[in-house]
Image: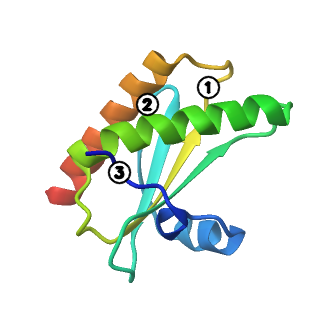
Amino acid sequence: MSFPLTQKYRLKKSSEFDLLFKNISSVSTPLMSLYYKKSKNNNVKIGFSVGKKTHKLAVNRNKIKRLMREVFRINASKYISHTLSYNIAVIYTGAEIPSFQELESSMKSLLLSFKNKVLS
């Protein structure tokens, strides 16, 4: 079963991202960083971001975000329970447009690290 990424489960407003980046915890890989914070909602909300300084064209940023969302949607149900209440931001820090396989391996290691930190 895949993880839903409907509007209910997305961080979209800049104010939500700002609240997330105060007193946060994080895990990182060479391609991505995952920032998380306990929330008051009863579900997981996630947002994806790609820096403008490293990827100047919006087409490239949007492509990377689409790939990240798809990789997360496919793999998240193995690592994240729907009963958790966290706000999560995944930020792509690589300099080039990645392949699906590169993103998938990086996302799996991020989600596994997140799972280990949250459950410990």
Amino acid type assigned to the residue bearing label 2 in the image: Thr
Q: Quadrant of the N terminus?
A: top left
Q: Secondary structure at mark 1?
A: loop
Q: Position of residue 110 (x, y in %)?
A: 36, 38
Q: Nearer the viewer, residue 110 or 61?
A: 61
Q: Is disc 1 in contact with disc 3, using a CB cutoff of under 8 Å?
A: no
State the SS at label 3: loop
Residue drawn at point x = 64 percent, y = 64 percent: 12
Q: Residue furthest toward the right?
A: 57
- Left or right, 34 with respect to 77, comes to right
Q: Are marks 1 and 2 in contact (CB under 8 Å)?
A: no
The residue indicated by pointer 1 is: 94
Taking the spot 80% from the left edge, 39% from the top edge, the residue there is 52
Residue 56 in the image: x percent, y percent? 85, 31
Q: Along the horizontal axis of the image, is 91 left or right of 108?
A: right
Amino acid type, mark 3: Phe
User: Is any atom of residue 8 visible in this view?
Assistant: yes
The residue identified by callout 3 is 3
Instruction: Give the left or right position of residue 95, taking residue 3 as reference.
Output: right
Q: 46 or 24: nearer the eye?
A: 46
Vertical arrangement, residue 15 with respect to residue 64, above or below: below
